[in-house]
Image: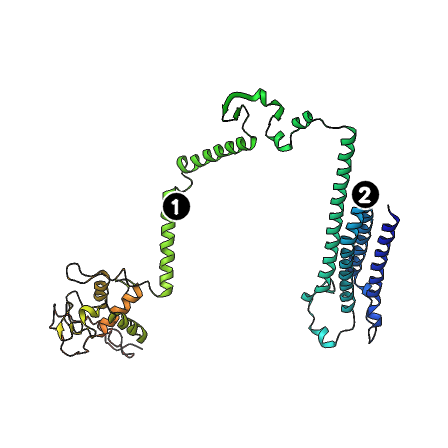
Amino acid sequence: MNLFNYNKSKNMIRLLGVSLAMGFVQPVWAAGPPAPSAFSNPLAIVLVVLMLLLLIVIGILANILIGTADVKLKKRKQQKVAIPVAAMLITLLLLSSSSLFAQTGAAPADAAATTTAGQTIGGMTASTFYVMATVIFLELFIIIALLINIKFLLKAEKDKLVAETQPVSEEVKKNQLSWWDKFNSFRPSSQEADLDLGHDYDGIRELNNRLPKWWLYGFYLTIIVGCIYLYRFHISHTGPSSKQEFETSVANAEIKVKEYLKMKGENVDENSITFLSAKEDLEAGKAIFIKDGFCATCHGKDGSGTINGVPGVGPNLTDDYWIHGGSIKNIFTTIKYGVSGKGMQEWESKLSPKELAQVASYVKSLKDTNPPNPKAPDGPLYKEEVTPAAPAIDSAKGKDGKMAMN
């Protein structure tokens, strides 16, 4: 081992020791009453001791690596790698030690009162613990890197020694197989003549090689999976078939669609439609009704059935005469499905269920608006079905009208 490298490593360790000592005495130099000793925290003592031990191990391994490597390589690595790593370790150790000792100092009464158990780890602040843990992991990483480099250097020296004492011939190299070739039972290239089947295709020879084991084992696995699949889905029927899975998926999708439409207020059909009396719904229905290419094209913008004083294709929607019924359900059904052969197209493909309900409600609201020059009545007279109200019950009498007995 070079004396210069030994002295330099020893100086680096001394520098780290001085840095740690400065961290220890920092609270003493601070103004104010003396803070409690950092060694009153067992976890802090353990972490500091562990950092120092790992630092000593790093110094020993670095000396071993430097002594094993080449002199030129040693100087280059030492100048470009060892110094930045040492500086980084010194900085992290100073940060961890200073934050450790700062947290043991006297804190204001209100700050101590607001400190919670979740902000400390083992009596130390979370930031201090994480910094010290980072230093330890960094030291472990450096130790692993040094061990790997030592292993590679020793292997290179061993191979060099073997090559010098026992030179390997070209024939031996041709017969050497990797672990992957041995696993697949491959034959060395020197035995290709024994495997040649005599078939040559544009310089590509056919050899009698066995299939690789990974391929054979994969093929055997597919056979096992196929047998399990055949038994489960086609013999025992314990699993759903492709058709059943498709039908189940479609049914689940329809349920989700209905739930979504119900949440959006658009799960409306001819059975569940009710008159929408809200102002925004009627205005939305009117906007669709008078839009170019929609209802006003045949019924007029006022629903009178006349367009510019001329009777249009559609009937008057403001009177009591309806060809297909004047209830809200009848109007919704007519708009949704249309009337074949009567010029009334279906609007289900162009409007959503909510929009169909809005248009039907707006058409229903046109009754008795008395527009000028309406079209003549068309269809039978429609009378709105009125549900009779339940008779009021006198509290002094029973349901049969007789006086209740006390």
Single out the mark in the foreground, 1 or 2. Answer: 2
Picture quarter containing residue 45?
A: bottom right
Q: Which of 205 and 140 is in front in this view?
A: 205
Residue 393, image x, y percentages: 27, 76
Q: Is residue 219 above or below residue 85?
A: above
Which of the marked residues, 1 or 2, is nearer the chain's N terminus? Answer: 2
Name the secondary structure under disc 1.
helix
Image quarter in which the N terminus is found: top right
Relative placement, left or right, of 54 versus 320 is right
Q: Distance between the residues labelled 1 and 2?
A: 67 Å
- Name of the residue lying farthest toward the front: 202
Q: Which of 238 and 85 is in front in this view?
A: 85
Number of other residues with Cα within 10 Å of mark 2, as a class: few under 14, some 14 to 19, many 20 or more = some
Q: Do the residues labelled 1 and 2 touch (CB within 8 Å)?
A: no
Closer to us: 256 or 348: 348
Say which residue label 1 marks: 245
* Residue 195 placement (x, y as % from top left): 56, 21
Task: Tell me the colour scheme of the image.
Answer: rainbow
Q: Which mark is residue 68?
A: 2
Image quarter in which the C terminus is found? bottom left
The location of residue 229, given as percent across then percent down, is 44, 37
* Label 1 crowd bin: few (<14), some (14–19), many (20+), radius 10 Å: few
SS at mark 2 in the image: helix
